[in-house]
Amino acid sequence: MNKEYEVFCQRLKTRQDELERRVANITRDVTRKASADWSEQAQERENDEVLDALGNEAVAELRLIQKALERIEEGDYGLCTGCGGDIPMARLEIMPYTDLCVKCAESQE
């Protein structure tokens, strides 16, 4: 592993742990027993929809993090999968799981 990427690896693993805990908590909350009160059930369903959306976002970010960790192991981290060029360190600081340089990311949007 490239020494300069060790800090990103640690940040990614820390974020991965946080997201895994969040997903576990969301799963626990969504699978709890529903209230007997109908109005409470309606509110719980709305809350579950919000929790479900948050869980989906967390799972999507977990996938990106896993791919980034794999790229670190393979020695491809920091290289744009679009053009093959270097991803600027400033971009990696903001989005350590990114696999695209700014130019390629903008062209995909």
Image: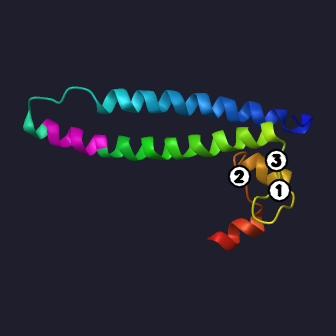
* Mark 2 or 3: the one toward you: 3
Tell me the quadrant of the picture where the N terminus can be found.
top right
Instruction: State yes or no: discs 1 and 2 in contact (Cβ < 8 Å).
Output: yes
- Bounds of the magenta segment: 40-48
The quarter of the displayed image where residue 26 is located: top left
Q: Amino acid at mark 3?
A: Asp
Where is residue 69? Give x, y as percent. 72, 38
Q: Which mark is residue 76?
A: 3
Where is residue 104? Give x, y as percent. 74, 68
The quarter of the displayed image where residue 55 is located: top left
Q: Is residue 82 above or below residue 79?
A: below
In space, the residues marked 2 and 3 are separated at their CA atoms by 12 Å
**Chain-order first, disc 1 or disc 2:** 1
Q: Amino acid at mark 2?
A: Thr
Task: Check disc 2: other Cα within 10 Å, few if <14, some if 14-19, many if 20+.
Answer: many
Lateral position of residue 42 relative to residue 64, left or right: left
* Residue identifier under label 1: 87
